[in-house]
Structure formats: structure tokens, C-alpha cells
Amino acid sequence: MLKFGEFIVKHRALILIIGVLLIIPSALGYMNTRVNYDILSYLPKDLSTMVGQDILKDDFGKGGFSFVITEGMTPKQIKETADKIAEVDHVADVVCYDSLTDLNIPREVLPEKVFDAFNKGDSSIMAVFFDDTTSADGTLAAIDEMRRITSKQCFISGMSAITTDMKHLSDSESVIYAVIAVILTSAVLVLAMDSFLIPVFFMLSIGLAIVWNLGSNFFLGEISFITQALALVLQLGVTMDYSIFLWHSYKEQQRYFSDHNEAMAHAIAATIVSVVGSSFTTIAGFLAMCFMSFTLGLDLGIVMAKGVVCGVIACVTVLPAMILVFDRAIERTSHKNLLPEFKRTSAFIMKRSWIFLVAAVVLLIPAAYGNHNYDVYYNLDSTLPADLDSVVANTKLSEEFDMNSTHLLLVRSDMEAKSARKMVDEIKNTDGVQFALSFDSLVGSAIPEEIIPDSVKSILKSDDWQLMLIGSEYKVATDQATQQIKAINSIVSRYDPDGMLIGEAPATQDLIEITDHDFKVVSVLSIAAVFLIIAFTLKSFSLPVILVAVIELAIMINLGLAYYMGTSLPFIASVVIGTIQLGATVDYAILMTTRYRTERSSGKAKKEAVSIALSTSVKSIVTSGLGFFAATVGVAVYSKIGMISSLCVLLSRGALISMAVVIGVLPSMFMVFDGLICRTSKGFLPENENTSHKHRIKLA
């Protein structure tokens, strides 16, 4: 590794040039990476809800759909608005009451229930179908165009409208996320480092690594908006430690080597060994998410694992080059370290270590209870600003038409008209169903199918399938919606075993069931991976149990607080926190453990070894924890996207909780289990004592 360090030092100018030049392909890759704003699109493709969406697109030329609510408009104005919308690119069909009566079907012949489904008071609705999926670029562009050409009396609702607003909101906030994270993290570094200028180079090198990572997402084709929003702050938070370690190593090597180039070469060699080992636990946590059948985990896991690798590379190449090039400027801006040494804190904890251990045991019960009982939400628009156009439209749809979700039902087109009407009548009698419209129920028995224009039939019938619309008063992801979906599926299965109920609510129900299983699998995998890495790194059977248990307590406290604070968390909270908080903050525990092993192996007594390990590690742990906190807390406060804000709240809070638990509880665990640790771990006993111990076992 020393030769590698010497190579970086010798070619530092070239390294900097290459690092900066990589911005160009990275920027191009970033600009050409599509961002997916549709969470439900990450569901497994073999689910009936996903298969049904493919059929809808292939057989009907339809993907997403929206309801447009009009207020105070005459039938003629509504018809003119419908005609305008129909001309918009990527709009496949527009269905409204007045457009139906204009297609050779006398208004008085249409059933009254059809009028009631489309009209309430001075409000009317029209269903707009798009020719691509809910979150396709064309669909989102169509929503924007529809808003531009329609009057203020029109309100566009539905998932496509929500997704459009989410896109605009996320795009407008992303740059602010970066600015806030950099400013707050730099403030922490100014306090923790001994130079006013070194935080600038930390941010520049980590920034390059982030740009490389985001640019390389081009090869994935697309990434989720959640991944895009979290990637920057997470990569900054979890890789900042590597830069700090290099700087400390460089300062330490200067004690032994007067030549700064030689000192840096040795610092790089030492950093590679430590940082690569440290990064394994973080990478393992992210990669565990790749085993989710809900592929948002794969998306986030790959991008963040890649980000850690990019962070390590930048830390041992670009950052050393920057430091050497600007060495004199850094020295001129040196200052006294502003963070305290925490000697009194360490002494206080050691003197009362049993209190911290008892407190951990006492906290475990309420933390575990809260961890298993906090409220979870799956409906994304429930946490968006109330003044967003789509949220306003959805509210109007709920208040004026008592409709909070819409299901689409696909059944075979050869189903007899009599059976179709009977099935629809049963569905209409299901609790919470506001209306159910099919081709047969729409035209009624008074109109022979043969005289219906093909332009009308094509909207609701294909060669193999027919499409039915079901309006529900129940909100997505509620218990009532779940029961309603089960009841409708039961009815449909009696008339057509191949029938498929699709739409946001059925897909969300699949999401609930799948993620519940996924998160359990990911939790086990992440714990197992980190456990094995610690066991291999520290060569111990007992330490992985102790260290993982300490961080898992911190995770339970973090998630459990949501229950006691009455906070509803996004459905991916448990897997994101369970993997990231474990992988990123277990390093705090490993740092203290490594020093504890060093002191014990040198012959120091248990209490002295633990005390030294705590006092020498606490400052680094506080710096790391505050850095992670700073990288995420600003985004938590600023973001108007509920899911992003909630996740960043948990990440920032988790960093502080892990920091506190490791500093307070882990030394107590060492004190209690010192004997077990020494017997089941390599390198904790002095060589002569270790030999004597083995000899006693052999004699026995």
C-alpha cells in the first residue's frame, strides 16, 4: 500500500486533473439519467396489478389516468375543455358525460346513474386516460400541458398529477439540499478540525465522489427520486469519516517524517487499510437492501454502495493530492481545535458505568414496544403541502364526489352483458363504492351494442378485455380500502377468474404485503452481514453480538420514539434506518473496540483499558455523529416532501442516538463481558498471558 501512496503523492497534479475532468462525463451521465417518481412501479412485475397495467397499455393504449374536476362550467364549456384535453400529446382518451351524449347517443337514453356518476351540483368530472404509464415523461408533460390550457375552474387529480407535482417539488429542492448539507457539515468540521481551510477540501473531494456516483447512475437507466434526494446527503454523511481519518493519519505521520510527501504516502497506506475495512459494514448494509422484491431497495442499495466506493477512492486519491497542493495555505489557516477533549465526560461515564447499563436494559422494553407499534403511511400525497395543485384537486374530488380512490377492473371482453351488469351491480353494493361503470352498464339495455360507435367501444373494450371504472370513498392504504379490495376481488372471481383489479389502491395493497416480508428479510441479512464482517475483522465470536446489540438498541430507540411522539413514518423507514443506521454507525463501536483491544493486549487491566478506549474515542465518535447529523438535519427541516423529510429526521436523530448509546452503553458492556470477550476473541490478551492461558487449557 505504501507504493500506492507514493504513486499518488508523486502524481498528485495528474490525480487532481483526472478527478476534475471526470466531472464532464459524470455531468452528462447525471443529466441523461431518468428519475422515476412512481413508487408503485418498483413492485414485482408478475403481480396481477402490474400485469393488468401492461394489459391496459398494450390492449387499450392506456397507462395512467386522472380525473379532471370542473366547477361552474356549462355543458358546452365542459365539452370544449374535454376536446382541448383530447388534443394534448400523450392523452389517449377523455370520457365525460357531455362527450358521450354527443356521440349519437341521446342524453335521455343514458341511464340516470351515468349522469350522477359524472355530475354533482355545479361540479362535473371527466376521466382522462394517457397513452403511457403513470409516471412516464410523456404523461407528466401532458399534465403540465393540461394545466396550461385549462381554466382555473379545472382541477386535475390522480397519481399522475401527484407525481408531476412531486417532480417539480423535488427538482426545485435538490440543489437546496446540497447547499444546506454542505454548510452545516462544514460548520461541524470547522469545530472538529484544526484548520479553517481543510473542511473546504473535504467538501470538494467528497463532492467529486458524489458527482462521480450520480453520473455513473446513467448505466442503471433510471433511479428513484427518493434515491436521488437521499444519495447526496447520505454519501456525505457516511463517507466524511474517511476524510477525517486521512487528515488525522497525515498529522500523525508528520511526527515521524519531516518530509510532507513521505508523511502523506504513509498516511495513504494506513488510511486504505482502515477505511476499506470500515467501509465494508456500510456497504454491506446498503447491499442487503438489494435483496428486496420491492426493487426500490435494489435502486437505493446499488447507488449508495457505489457512493461509498467512490468516497473511498476520492479519499485516498483526490483528497491527499489537494492537501499536498494546498499544504501551505492549510497550515496558515490552522487554529486550535474547538471541540473539547471530553475528559470529564469519559470519567463520568466510567465512574457510573453500571447506571448506563441499567438504563439501557430499562430503555430496551419501551423501545422495543415503540419499534413494533409506530404508525406507518403508504399514501405519498398524505404528507405533501396542502396547496399543491394535485392535492387541492384530490381534496375537491373527495369533498364534492366523496371519492378518494379509483379502481380499474379488467375482465374478459366475451363476458355476457347480463353477467357484466349483474357483477357491476354487486360491486356497487360493496361498502364504500360510489359508482361502478362498465361498457354494458354505461349504455344500458336500451341501446344495442351494434349501434355504439367504435370510438366509444374502444375506450372500454378490446378484443380480449373490457375495462370497468370503480369509484371508492375510501382512501388508499386504509383498512377500509383493504376490505373493499378483498370484497371486490371475491365478487370478480365468481364471474371471471382471470379478472384483475388494478389502480393505486390495489397496487398499494400489494406494496403493503410485499414490503412487510421484504423488510424482515433485509433486516436479517443486514444484521448477519455486519455480524460476519465484525467477526472476521475483530476475530471474535462475542464482539459481533455486543456491537450489533448496541446499535440495534439505538435503532429501536430511534424508531420507537416515533410511536411515543405520535409521528407517522413512511413505509420504507424501517428498512432504510435498519440498514443505514446499522452499517454507518457501527463504525463508532468498532473504533472504540479496536482501541480497547490495543490497551488490553498491552497488559492493561480491564477498567484502565476501557477507560483509555473511551477517552480516546469519544471525540472522534462525537465528530462523526455530529457530521452525519449535520448532513441530514437541514434537509429534514427544509424538505416539503414528507417522505424525504421523515427519513432525514430519522437519519439525523439516529446518528445522535447511536453516538450517545455507543459512548454511554458500550464501555459498560466491555466492563461486564470483559472475561468473555478476552476468551472468545483474538488479540485481547498479552502474548505471555495468552500462551499461559492456552497452556492451562492443555493441562486441564
Image (spheres, helix red, strand yellow):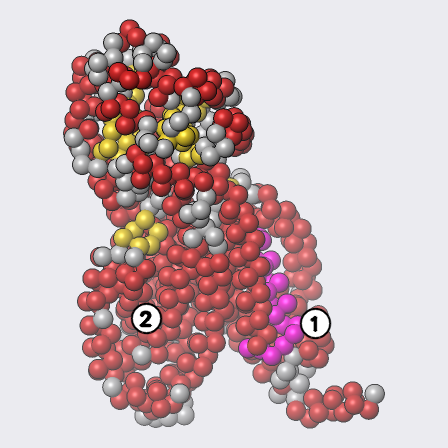
Residue type beneath disc 1 = Phe
Reading the chain from its start, which is encountered first: label 2 or label 1? 2
Q: Where is residue 260 in the image (x, y as percent from the top left)?
A: 31, 89
**Which residues fall within the magenta stretch?**
537-557
Q: Position of residue 558 (x, y in %)?
A: 54, 52
Q: Where does the C terminus fall, quadrant-wise?
A: bottom right
State the residue position of label 2: 202
Per the image, label 1 sits on a secondary structure element best described as helix
The residue lying furthest to the right in this view is: 700
Q: In this view, does 544 lie to the left or right of 247?
A: right
Q: Where does the N terminus fall, quadrant-wise?
A: bottom left
Asked if the residue under mark 1 is in contact with the one under mark 2, i.e. CB atoms within 8 Å, the reply is no
Q: Report the residue at 37% width, 61% height from top.
A: 303
Q: Position of residue 452 (x, y in %)?
A: 27, 18
State the residue position of label 1: 673
Q: Position of residue 349 (x, y in %)?
A: 62, 67
